[in-house]
Image (tube, rainbow, N blue to C red):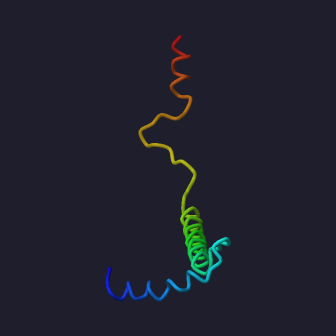
Amino acid sequence: MSASVSLAVTHLVPLAKEVDENKVTPGVLGFIVFAVMALAVWGLMKSMSKHMQKVDFKESPDAGAEPVGTKADSTARQS
């Protein structure tokens, strides 16, 4: 651990002792993490919505495939 990190942690230790040990709250850090996660989910949903609008859900027929029903009609006529 670097000296600056050690010094920062040393200054935060007295603040931790002032907290009531029977009451646990997420505090400011919990709110910041939750807000960042909420913004990330919002951004991902917005991006997904934009990409889904570009998708064409209609299938185009294959060039080499026979039309549906042609094969069944030709076997029925031969019998």
Q: Which residue lies furthest to the top in this view?
A: 79
Quarter of the view holding residue 29:
bottom right
4 on left or right of 49? left
The residue depicted at 32 percent of the width and 79 percent of the height is 1
Q: In this view, does 61 lie above or below 75?
A: below
x then y, percent, for residue 31: 62, 77
Query: For residue 50, what is the image quadrant?
Result: bottom right
Residue 39's quadrant in the figure? bottom right
User: Eyeballing the image, is 67 above or below 61?
Assistant: above
Q: In x, y percent, where is residue 21? A: 63, 73
Is residue 36 shown above or below 77? below
Residue nearest the observer in this picture, 61 or 11: 11
Depth order, front residue of 72/53: 53
User: Depth check: 39 or 78 in front?
Assistant: 39
Residue at far left of view: 2
Tell me the residue at 41%/39% (across/down). 64
* Residue 63 locus on image (x, y percent): 43, 43
